[in-house]
Amino acid sequence: MHRRSLASANALNKSTPSNRGVSILSWLLTSTTTEYWHNDLLCQRYEEAQYHSDIASLSHERVRVIFESSAQSHIDAWLAELPFPAYFSVLERENDLIGIEISASKSFTEMMSAFDISVTQHSLAAELLLITAPLPLLKQRGLLVMDMDSTAIQIECIDELAVLAGVGDEVAEVTASAMRGELDFEQSLRLRVSKLANADATIIDTLCKNLPLMPGLTASLAELQANQWKVVVASGGFMPFVNHLMYLLKLDAAFANELIIEDGKLTGHVSGDVVDAQYKATVIGKCAQKWQIETGQVVAIGDGANDIPMIQAADLGIAFHGKPKLINAANLAVNKLDLRALVFCLQAS
């Protein structure tokens, strides 16, 4: 297909076909034409890989809109309010979310506010990601380091173990104290684990057999691993569960705390160094060095404040359904969608 250069496209006069009756989104998803007139404003299409070479030099702001097909009519209505010329790209990924990128020389502030209101009012399964720096490349070797509890899986293992051990309320009290800032992570971990003393170790196997993976995890990992990415879990949880995930998901490495078991019972203690926030951050550097991952190709994702050092040590830090402190520290935040959105946080090529 012949494509005009962006410079020549800018020189088009308004005799270009107006695409009457076709929305911006329909033009992007069903048409192959490179130009579209919207309210006398010229919109142009580009390939995702074209951004760095042709558009970044124009000092454009860039946002990505990722959404379920059920939100399509609302995204259409939002785009219909576009008040300035823009460039668009369709983001092709190996899952059924829809992704588009928008780049324009005008500020997106007002449009982003309108988008946030729409998402809130209609409970839309949609995300708007403001891209402020070059993204890691999906189709180049990279490293993903994930938290486990409430990120790779849907539960907090210590809480579920406590329920199985009959001490759920006691552990929940410690968790609440930690969330109020009364305990640091290591204090909280050791105190919660102490509540498990004398519990039958078979509760670990019971929980391993029922670990609920986070929706979208396997789809995104399959796409990453097909592109030679290394995938690691660094967790403040426990080794039996990360080992289970290693086997299930073909992970390259996993780091977590080791529960001490004697005579088939939990002792209420962990052995070795505690995998805390700083430990998780050091995993980034160690794994990147071990596999010689190029600068710019390291991604970390988590949900809690103890993931802040880890995501700050990565080239791209993503908050997934995160706590406010983590969201403030992250480069990008996924709040509404599942982990299928992860690969849309990367540049295709």
Image (cartoon, rainbow, N blue to C red):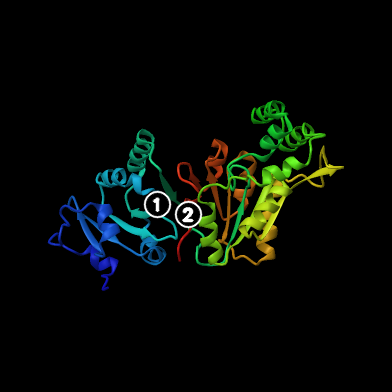
Q: CA distance from mark 2 to mark 1?
A: 8 Å
Q: Are marks 2 and 1 in contact (CB under 8 Å)?
A: yes
List the residue tagged with mark 2: 345
| Quadrant of the drawing holding the C terminus | bottom left
Three-letter code, disc 1: Arg
Q: Which element carries disc 1, helix, strand or loop? A: strand
Q: Which element carries disc 2, helix, strand or loop? A: helix
Residue 221: x %, y % from top left:
55, 58
Instruction: Give the numbered dot on residue 64.
Output: 1
| Rendered view: 196 above or below 218 | above
Residue 48: x %, y % from top left:
39, 63
Q: Residue at image x 44%, y 57%?
A: 95
Three-letter code, disc 2: Cys
- Which of the two residues, 108 or 261, is positioned nearer the viewer here? 261
Question: Badge 2: how crowded within 10 Å, few (<14), some, or many (20+)?
Answer: many
Q: In this rendering, would 315 be left or right of 277?
A: left
| Quadrant of the drawing holding the N terminus | bottom left
Residue 175: x %, y % from top left:
67, 30
Q: Residue at image x 56%, y 37%?
A: 323
- Residue lying at the far right in this picture: please name it: 263
Question: Which quadrant of the view contains residue 7?
Answer: bottom left
Q: Residue at image x 74%, y 37%?
A: 189
